[in-house]
Image (tube, helix red, strand yellow):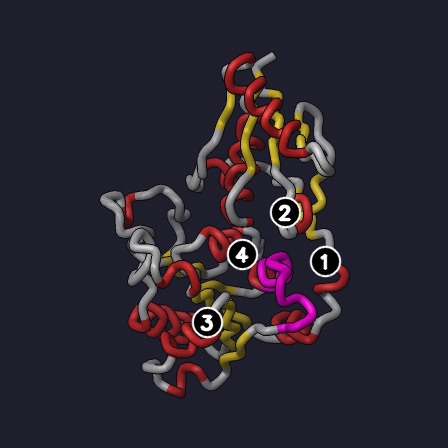
Amino acid sequence: MKKAYIKLFAGLGNQLFQYAYGQYLVQQGYTVRYILNRSSFDLLSVFTLTPQERVTVFAPEGKFKNLFLFLIKCYARFIEHNYHTGFYQDVRYPAQLFSLNLHFTREREYSKTGEYKNIRSSTAISVHIRGGDYIYEKQYSGICTADYYRKAMEYIRQTAGDCHFFIFTNDIEYAQQVLQPIHRDILQNAVFINNSDFKQDPGFDLFLMKSCTHHIIANSTFSWWGAFLNNTPNKIVIAPKNWTNNEDKGTINICADNWIRI
């Protein structure tokens, strides 16, 4: 039996890609062991995973968790010689799966909020503006500009008609600066998602994103998953033409063929 040990690390969007890569390997006949260093809002905190054959999540807690993590990584790398650590940001892995076996742990709580009810009662467009660390990250900064969001919003309005924009951001002040040059007519139905009850819970924003009808995403795996998890037929997803400032720029195979690149 082929085995693969996959490290789950970095932000929630990256962990979802790593998880999807493991699910892809299961379909190829592998037995998969995920290795996770628990944190406040990791994959296991946000999602309930449906139990599966040939899949185990190794996520120790307690006083000796770092020792256990070190030992399992050594075992995977030097004994099994099948330790996988990477970001696996490729649409082929999740797109080829019948199911990701993911369920939001707090879905019932999220569904009772006014934000969710507003989203479900309108033609809702999720707009993700990534500030914070992205402002200084040369690899990702300067791609999703005001011009990008203006063109994307204009396209959505022309295509979807009367719609409401829901702004998701980790940096409201920065997002306001980005949107400031955009004409008021476009933003008249725009609302910032800022629920204090779920301030530190990325699962809430991700759940609301995927509940929208259409999406304008940033060059971020977080909003990528918000759009991907939405199963609305004929959804419109607009993504930046360039994903990074590296040499690969727009050639990275992360966006689905029917997503619109601007």
Q: Is residue 35 left or right of residue 251?
A: right
**Vertical placement of residue 132 versus 32, above or below:** below
Q: Amino acid at mark 2?
A: Ser
Query: Mark 2 and mark 3 in contact (Cβ < 8 Å)?
Result: no
Q: Quadrant of the C terminus?
A: bottom left
Determine the CA span between mark 4 and mark 3.
Answer: 19 Å
Residue receiving disc 2 = 39
Residue visible at 44% across and 76% down in the picture: 173
Q: Is residue 199 magenta?
A: yes
Q: Earlier in the sequence, mark 2 or mark 4?
A: 2
Element under label 2? loop
Mark in front: 3 vs 2: 2
Name the residue tied to disc 3: 160
Q: Mark 3: which secondary structure? A: helix
- Rate crowding at label 1 as few (under 14), some (14 to 19) or many (20 or more) other CA atoms within 10 Å: some
| Magenta stretch, residue numbers | 195-208
Mark 1 to mark 2: distance in Å? Answer: 20 Å
Kindly identify the amino acid type of the residue bearing the numbered disc 3: Ala
Above or below residue 237? Residue 74 is above
Instruction: Tell me the residue that label 1 is attached to.
Output: 107
Q: Is residue 218 left or right of residue 75?
A: left
Say which label, 3 or 2, has the lower sequence index.
2
* Residue kind at label 1, given as amino acid type: Glu
Horizontal and vertical percent for residue 138? 29, 55
Q: Kindly identify which numbered label has been placed on residue 226.
A: 4
Q: Earlier in the sequence, mark 3 or mark 1?
A: 1
Q: Marks 3 and 1, how far apart in space? A: 27 Å
